[in-house]
Image: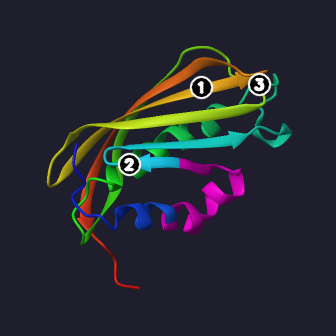
């Protein structure tokens, strides 16, 4: 896959820094390239639900945001991506020390981009796939701030 805009890496890095909710959760950009993005999250007690598993909202947010970042690498220079739909499967309860998410663009069009995310939980260096999402992104004109 070839990037639509070589400056998109800077745009994605900026998005991770500016997205207050992502920053508050502690999700960090790990790497990116044309059509893909990886993020990670060190798990703490605040990420857990009542049964001490990672909250579904944390997993869904990470899958969605990382997919959006992968899509942004393929957007035109004057465009940003916004999620218009996503579906997520929670494959097993998530526990561990870290989450890692990898998203890859499946189809990059001019107005819609479809990306797929996989979220892995890591404990003592062993990873297990805990969630998988398909995310549809609309490419829209960047706002003028």
- Nearer the observer, 20 or 85: 20
- Give the extent of the magenta segment: 14-30
* Alpha carbons under labels 3 and 2: distance apart: 27 Å
Q: Position of residue 8 (x, y in %)?
A: 35, 63
Q: Pointer 3: residues within 10 angstroms few (<14), some, or many (20+)?
A: some
> If you read the primary sequence from the N terminus, does the residue marked by circle 2 or circle 1 appear first?
2
Judging by the rendered image, the residue that carries numbered circle 1 is 120
Of badges 2 and 1, the one in the foreground is 2
Q: Are marks 1 and 3 in contact (CB under 8 Å)?
A: no
Q: CA distance from mark 1 to mark 3?
A: 10 Å
In screen coordinates, is 136 left or right of 65? left
Relative to 131, 58 lies left or right: right
Label whose residue precedes the other's in the sequence (3 or 2): 2
Spatial CA distance of label 2 from label 1 is 20 Å
Query: In the shown orientation, is residue 143 left or right of residue 111?
Result: right
Tell me whether the residue at label 3 lies in contact with that at label 2, contact meaning CB atoms closer than 8 angstroms.
Answer: no
Q: How is the image coloured?
A: rainbow
Question: Which residue is labeled 2 in the image?
Answer: 33
């Amino acid at each position: 896959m070839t990037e639509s805009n070589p400056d998109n890496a800077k745009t994605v890095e900026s998005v991770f820094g500016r997205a207050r909710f992502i920053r508050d959760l502690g999700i960090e950009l790990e790497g990116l390239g044309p059509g893909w993005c990886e993020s990670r999250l060190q798990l703490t007690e605040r990420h857990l639900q009542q049964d001490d598993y990672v909250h579904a909202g944390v997993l869904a947010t990470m899958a969605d945001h990382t997919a959006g970042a992968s899509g942004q690498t393929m957007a035109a220079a004057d465009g940003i991506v916004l999620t218009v739909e996503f579906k997520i499967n929670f494959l097993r309860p998530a526990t561990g020390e870290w989450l890692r998410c990898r998203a890859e663009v499946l189809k990059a069009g001019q107005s819609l981009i479809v990306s797929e995310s996989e979220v892995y939980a890591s404990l003592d260096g062993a990873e297990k796939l805990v969630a998988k999402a398909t995310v549809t992104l609309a490419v829209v004109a960047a706002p003028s701030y």
